[in-house]
Image (tube, rainbow, N blue to C red):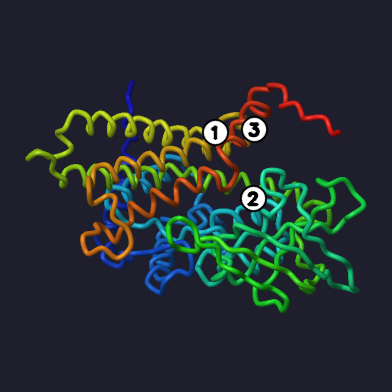
Amino acid sequence: MDLAYGPEYEAFREEVRGFISTHGDKAPQRFGVARPSDELIAWQKLLIEHGLTARTIPKQYGGYGAEPDILKSRIIAEEFTKAGLPSGIANQGISMFVPTLLELGTEAQKQEWISRTLHGEVIWCQGYSEPGSGSDLASLQTKATEDGDDFIINGQKIWTSTAASADWIFCLVRTEPDKPKHAGISYLIFSMKTPGIEVRPLKTMTGHAEFNEVFFTDVRVPKSQIVAGRGQGWFVANATLKHERGMLGDPNQAGTRLKQIIDLMHEEMLDGERLIDNPLFRDRLTQLQSRVLAMQFHGLRLLTASLKGEDPGIARLIVKLQGCEINHQLAALAIDALGEIGVLYGDSPHLRAHGSWQHRYMFDLGLIIGGGTAQIQKNIIAERGLGMPREPKVAKA
C-alpha cells in the first residue's frame, strides 16, 4: 500500500512550508475566541490571500476561491500544527454562521455578511439555549410579535458565548405561536446594539465569564433580517448545529494540543528522567495519540462524504462527543505532566504557559455539557444513527 501523497501534493507542502518560513513571525502569539486583535486580523487576511484559510469559500464572498481538495486541506493542517501557528480566526461567525449562510442564505445576505465575518470585522454570537430550553431546544419561548415591517422580540437566552463582545447575533425566536413547536421558530439576525438588549456575564469555574445571559425587552428587528423564511428556523438551526458540532470536535485543534503535550513531556522531569521516557506517562500519551489520529482520519472521511454530496450518517453524529471528550483527556494528561504546578491557578508566579492548561481542563469539562451534553449526544447516536427506540417518556399524572 502506497500512502505517499504524490509529487503534486508534496510540492504543495513545500509551498505551505515556504509560507510558514517567510511569514510565520507575523503570527500572533496569544489569541482567544472573543474580539480578535489587530495582529490576528492581519494574520487572517494574509492567510486568506494565500489560500491557507477560507480556502474554498468563493472569492466574491471574501474567500480564496479554490476547488475543494481534501489532501491539501490536510497538508495545511499538518504543517501549521507542526509549526505551532494559528490557522486563522476561529469563532462562531466563521465556523457556524458563514457555512449556514453559504447553504441557506440569500445572495444579498452572503454579500453583506460573509466577507466581513471572515475578515474579523463582524463578531457573532448564537442565541439558542434558554433557561427552560436546553436539551429540548425546540421548546424555546423567546417570542416575536408583528408590528408593521418589524418583529418585537421579548425573552431570554442563556449560555451565550461571546455575547459581551459580539456585534450581531443569530437567534432562534418563536414567530408562529399557533404552529407546532418545531414549525413555529424563525432564525433572525440582528445587532447586539439594538435598544432593549441586556447582557449579563456568567462566571464559570474557570474564573472567567465565557458565557452570558441575554435579555430581550421590546427589541425591534426588521422582518427582512430572517434566514430561509418564517417558520424555517428549526431547519436552519440544525444546519448551524451541524457546523457547531464540527467546530467543537475539530481534529486539527486536537492535533495541535497533542503536539504541545509531546513538547511538554520532553521538557518535564520526574525523578531525574524526562516524562516522555516514563512508561506510564508514555502509555497514556500513546493511547491519546492513537485516538487523535483516528479523529483526524475520521475528519477526512467526513470531508470525502461532503465533497461527494453523501450523507455520512452516524459518522457525523459522533464528532462532538468524541472531540470534547478527547480534548478534556488531553488537558488532564497535561495537568498530570505538570505535577504540583498543574494544580496552580490564578496569578501564581510559577504558572506555565499563563495557566492555559488549567483553563483548558476546566473549560473543556464544560464543553462536554455545552453544545449538547454527552448524554444527549449518545441519545442522538443511538436513535438517529443506530435506529434504536426512543427513551420512553414518563406518563403525565
Which residue is denoted by mark 1 in the rendering?
Answer: 318
At 54% from the left edge and 54% from the top edge, which residue is drawn?
A: 95
Residue 380 is labelled as: 3
| Residue 124: percent from left, percent from top | 59, 65
Q: Amino acid at mark 1?
A: Ile
Q: Residues within 10 Å of mark 3 (few under 14, many from 20)?
A: some
Query: The N terminus lies in which quarter of the figure?
Result: top left
At 28% from the left edge and 31% from the top edge, which residue is drawn?
A: 284
Q: Amino acid at mark 3?
A: Ile
Q: Tell whether 344 sits left or right of 378.
A: left
| Residue 71: percent from left, percent from top | 41, 40
At 81% from the left edge and 57% from the top edge, which residue is drawn?
A: 174
- Nearest to viewer (mark 3 / mark 2): 3
Q: Quadrant of residue 200?
A: bottom right
Q: In what element is the residue under mark 1?
A: loop
Residue 60, can we see it? no
Disc nearer the start of the sequence (1/2): 2
Q: Amino acid at mark 2?
A: Thr
Dots 1, 2 in contact, CB < 8 A: no
Nearer to me, 41 or 288: 288
Q: Residues within 10 Å of mark 1 (few under 14, many from 20)?
A: some
Disc nearer the start of the sequence (3/1): 1
Q: In what element is the residue under mark 2?
A: helix
Q: Tell whether 365 sits left or right of 137.
A: left
Nearer to me, 279 or 263: 279
